[in-house]
Image: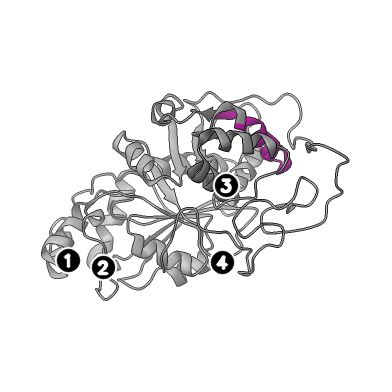
Amino acid sequence: MSLDSRQAVATHDGRADASVAANGDSKGSWGDTEDSYGHSGPVNKPKSGAVRRARKVEGGIFFPKPENAVTIAVSSRVLFRTETEQKVFEERGVEEYLKYQVEHENEPFAPGPAFPFVKALETVNSQLRELYPDSEELFDIVLVTYNHAHVGVRLINTINYHNLFIERFCMTGGSSPIGYLKAYHTNLYLSADAEKVREALAEGIAAATMFTPEKLIEVSDTQLRVAFDGDAVLFSDESERIFKTHGLDKFFEHEKEHENKLLDHGPLKGFLEALGKLQKKFYEKGHRLDCPIRTYLVTARSAASSGIRALKTLRAWGLETDEALFLAGAPKGPMLEKIRPHIYFDDQMFHVEGAAEMGTIAAHVPYGIAQKHPHKKDSSKSK
């Protein structure tokens, strides 16, 4: 299976959504696009122009300072479906692209692969606001786009149509957004642009390239579920380098000898830490068992021979995942299908593709030795 970060979205059962054209653009205007992600339904058409839905949060709302919030920066190309617009840009140039966007600004973009993840973040925020009305420790979502400000009208109309609570925009007009991400104290950056993701990682910002499977499994609308690979994602690629250079036996030997030595941190360790801080706020109110955030470690490491070092490292960091799955080289896709995460992070495209085949929205973290030595399908691995 070959994935493209702009690959078409389908509904949960794998059939093409009737309200979305095959090229990814919305067929209709505000009245005849899908009501919410994966669920189509008729909506009364407006007489003319766009119809803005009532904000789901009314009055008295404050916006957290970036340094206090868990800031998630999301590219417009992964939050929404923009394949048609991208094609116009590539084939006809920027001026025709801008003209096209203005002419279609009353047509909402269809949801993209990051849409259910963002909706889940907002669900968590609603519960945090109920428990801690004055707290700024919330998810703060920033829409990041290379678009010119003219396109902002269509993006705002789309956000209002889908009833998303996103008030911070970063429209760079073709410039790199990385400097702005640092100013926003970004905890996670999701994009369809692998080059910009690598640039963000090089600046110490947790980032991943998002992909969309041809079919989508249904995900929870009451609990945010985030799954992580271990090596080169939560942890450094130290152990991965041993495996790639010296093989599996040396890897097991190295892990046994160093089981009491902590692994260095990987690019997404900080994001897991941020999730953990929000989880503890629910625990403090007696909501450990029904916490609306759940995290998973899904690793190809073996439990007895190499898993102990990973668990000891997490414990020493003061971090935990709600569930830890040590697969000893078994495919991750079937397990992820059972977990049904809103997003799964892995450093190897082999595992990202395997997850996508089972309907999981997966994101690639292009970090570490595996980028130079891709995983082979016929190899057995236990990292």
Is residue 291 in view?
Answer: no
Mark 1 → mark 3, Cα distance in angstroms:
45 Å
Which circle's residue, 2 or 4, is located before the other in the chain? Answer: 4
Which residue has dot 3 on it?
A: 82
Q: Earlier in the sequence, mark 1 or mark 4?
A: 4
Q: Position of residue 224 (x, y in %)?
A: 56, 51
Look at the numbered discs 2 and 1 and tell me whether their residues touch, using CB distance below 8 Å: yes
Which callout, 4 or 3, points to the residue nearer the camera? Answer: 3
Chain part drawn in magenta: 151-169
Q: Which mark is residue 382?
A: 2
Distance in Å between CA atoms under marks 2 and 4: 28 Å
Q: Name the residue type under label 4.
A: Lys
Image coords of residue 71 (percent x, y): 49, 34
* Secondary element at tag 3: loop
Checking the image for residue 215, the label placed there is: 4
Badge 3, how many Cα within 10 Å: few under 14, some, many 20+? many
